[in-house]
């Protein structure tokens, strides 16, 4: 199992952030992500970082877990930063070393992009860390409901989403089991030339696919056996309700966003 | 192969909110040539424990000695050698079938470990007979097999490698009663015939008491008890307190003791011996 990347994982909890209505969370994240790209000044970045950090703190997910879990992401951010510094040739040169000059625009752009990337990943990761996949799907379905009037299959889309999300952990576990069974039979996918290692994936993939197809069939059968049929008239086991807490969160967010737009440029 | 565990800890996903200590200071010894059954509740760490035997998992702390191999938190580069000598039969054989034909799948392990293939193929018919797999199935696709046949295929692949240590993780799950007996008899037979150490993880007390010469009880990631099956008769209250089933013979002996006012001080495990004692008793003789 890949334990080094936490994007997409859910950490159970009872924190304030966990309890916010997933619809509101989605809307906030959506606005936040759009807004990141219009930040220019130091102060506006400050506000965005403040939002992200206070969300992280309020979520009660251990900070070390988040920082370590984003390890691969740090690398990407650093690389982006480096590329920008090395390749951008605009503005005034700041310093020159061995005939290579660092331009002020390059530094600025590099910082800008890295900060945006970091915020983007941090906030979306916090969303999945504090919201169950099922809640996210429910929220997507609720938010997309208006599209039903143009005959967009909202419910089916949500169903597909929730089934795929539901089975990701199962498939990860299964991969782990298959890998163990094949390793016990002498399969080696960690050493040797690349060609051999690629070939070693086949004994992994085939049982995985066979299992996935079988599971899909079983699931379809089980759903049909229980008389499942589409969205119309279905009630929900977990009905989403907008609580006073959500109202407060929404208001705070509106206030902070107003502040952001004032300081943006 | 001799197995010695010293204070072995194993933690899943350490340093995350999902951290889970599955083994806590496990120490035990399994002598060469013994047949050890591991029992315990679901989640007690049985599978985690046996996966240390061929280095699928490495101890977070402590050391595990498997034959001449020593496993600890550090990487060991003899893992392949170890796996060649340790045969594993898992709970779900469908997790490993992938070749086009049953035959190829059976030969997958031996091929990976660099066995001489012509010799292995010569042994194949005998092994097939042993595991009860019809030779006509060899050219079929493994995905067309029944659950029991899949399991036999997996077992045949392991047996071909003539492991020094055979590890069975609930090898009879999902088999019918007849298939179950047959497979267990096969393991027992192979164990006696070959110079092999066997470790069996099972939920079936009857099997544990019938085939094993040593029983280990795992509870909450710790070794709760390790003893001869016979000795466990005197600890039956303890087993019941753990919520473990007792084998039918124990209940039967218990019942006879209570009804007839006799005591079995030397616990007997086979139905024949109980019947013998009983008839002695009824004829007015002694229990021994
Ligand atoms: N990959 C994993 N990540 C985290 N925890 C795990 C993982 N695999 C097992 N565990 C946990 O470790 C504990 C021991 O699991 P293990 O599979 O060894 O139990 P078991 O005794 O074999 O149970 P069963 O009889 O159901 O097979 C369980 O509490 C389980 O939830
Ligand atoms: Mg298990």
Image: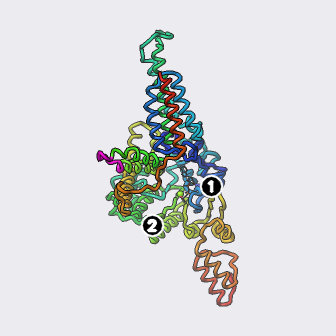
> Does the Cβ of the disc 1 residue fall within 8 Å of ligand 1?
yes
What residue would you read off at disc 2? Answer: B175
Check disc 1 and report its element: helix, strand or loop. loop
Give coordinates of residue B24: x percent, y percent: 65, 51
Q: Which mark is residue A178?
A: none
Check disc 2 and report its element: helix, strand or loop. loop
Image check: B146 left or right of B216?
A: left
Chain of the residue under the numbered disc 2 shown in the image: B
Where are the magenta residues, as a range? A148-156
Packing grade of label 1 (10 A; few <14, some 14-19, many >=20) is many
What residue is at 48 percent from the left and 70 percent from the top?
B181
Q: Do the dots labelled 2 and 1 sit on one chain?
A: yes
In the image, residue A164 above or below residue A101:
below
In the image, residue A226 above or below residue A190:
below
Packing grade of label 2 (10 A; few <14, some 14-19, many >=20) is some
Q: Tell me if residue A155 is in the magenta stretch.
A: yes
In the image, residue A165 above or below residue A118:
below
In the image, residue A169 above or below residue B126:
above
Q: Nearer the viewer, residue B65 or A45?
A: A45
Front of the two marks 2 and 1: 1
Q: Which of marks 1 and 2 precedes in the sequence?
A: 2
Q: Nearer the viewer, residue A128 or B119?
A: A128
Main secondary structure type of the part rendered in magenta: helix
Mark 2 to mark 1: distance in Å?
Answer: 28 Å
How many marks on residues? 2
What residue would you read off at disc 1? Answer: B221
Give coordinates of residue A74: x percent, y percent: 51, 30
Give coordinates of residue B31: x percent, y percent: 62, 58
Image check: B264 left or right of B138?
A: right
Chain of the residue under the numbered disc 1 shown in the image: B
Q: Tell me if residue A261 is in the magenta stretch.
A: no
Q: Is residue B58 visible?
A: no
């Amino acid at each position: 199992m890949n334990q080094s990347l936490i994007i997409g994982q859910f950490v159970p909890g009872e924190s304030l952030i966990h309890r916010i209505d997933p619809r509101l969370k989605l809307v906030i994240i959506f606005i936040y992500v759009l807004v990141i790209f219009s930040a220019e000044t130091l102060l506006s970045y400050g506000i965005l970082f403040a939002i992200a950090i206070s969300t992280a703190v309020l979520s009660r997910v251990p900070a070390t877990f988040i920082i370590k879990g984003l390890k691969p992401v740090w690398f990407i951010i650093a690389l982006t930063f480096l590329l920008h510094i090395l390749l951008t040739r605009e503005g005034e040169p700041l310093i020159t070393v061995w005939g290579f000059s660092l331009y002020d625009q390059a530094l600025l752009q590099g910082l800008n992009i890295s900060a945006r990337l970091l915020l983007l990943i941090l906030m979306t990761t916090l969303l999945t860390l504090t919201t169950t996949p099922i809640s996210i799907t429910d929220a997507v379905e609720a938010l997309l409901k208006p599209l039903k009037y143009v005959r967009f299959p909202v419910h089916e889309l949500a169903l597909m989403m929730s089934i795929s999300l539901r089975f990701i952990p199962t498939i990860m576990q299964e991969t782990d089991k298959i890998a163990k069974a094949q390793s016990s039979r002498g399969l080696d996918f960690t050493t040797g030339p690349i060609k051999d290692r690629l070939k070693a994936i086949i004994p992994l993939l085939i049982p995985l696919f066979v299992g996935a197809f079988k599971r899909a069939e079983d699931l379809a059968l089980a759903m049909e056996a229980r008389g499942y049929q589409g969205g119309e008239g279905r009630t929900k086991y977990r009905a989403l309700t907008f609580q006073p807490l959500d109202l407060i969160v929404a208001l705070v967010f509106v206030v902070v966003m107003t502040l952001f737009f004032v300081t943006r440029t | 192969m001799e197995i010695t565990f010293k204070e072995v800890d194993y933690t899943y996903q350490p340093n995350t909110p999902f951290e889970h200590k599955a083994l806590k200071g496990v120490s035990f010894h399994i002598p060469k040539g013994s047949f050890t059954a591991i029992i315990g509740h679901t989640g007690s760490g049985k599978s985690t424990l046996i996966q240390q035997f061929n280095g699928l998992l490495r101890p977070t702390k402590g050391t595990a000695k498997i034959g001449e191999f020593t496993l600890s938190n550090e990487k060991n580069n003899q893992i392949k050698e170890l796996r060649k000598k340790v045969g594993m039969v898992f709970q779900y054989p469908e997790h490993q079938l992938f070749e086009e034909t049953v035959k190829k799948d059976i030969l997958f392990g031996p091929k990976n470990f660099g066995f001489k293939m012509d010799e292995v193929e010569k042994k194949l018919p005998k092994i097939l007979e042993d595991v009860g797999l019809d030779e006509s199935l060899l050219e079929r696709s493994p995905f067309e097999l029944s659950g029991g046949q899949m399991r036999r295929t997996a077992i045949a692949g392991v047996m071909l490698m003539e492991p020094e240590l055979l590890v069975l993780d609930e090898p009879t799950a999902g088999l019918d009663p007849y298939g179950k007996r047959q497979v267990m008899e096969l393991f027992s037979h192979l164990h006696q015939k070959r110079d092999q150490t066997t470790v069996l993880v099972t939920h079936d007390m009857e099997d544990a008491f019938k085939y094993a010469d040593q029983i280990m009880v795992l509870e909450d990631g710790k070794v709760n008890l390790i003893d001869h099956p016979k000795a466990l008769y005197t600890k039956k209250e303890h087993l019941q307190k753990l919520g473990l089933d007792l084998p039918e013979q124990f209940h039967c002996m218990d019942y006879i003791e209570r009804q007839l006012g006799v005591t079995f001080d030397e616990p007997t495990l086979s139905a024949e011996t109980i019947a013998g004692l009983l008839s002695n008793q009824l004829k007015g003789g002694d229990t021994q």
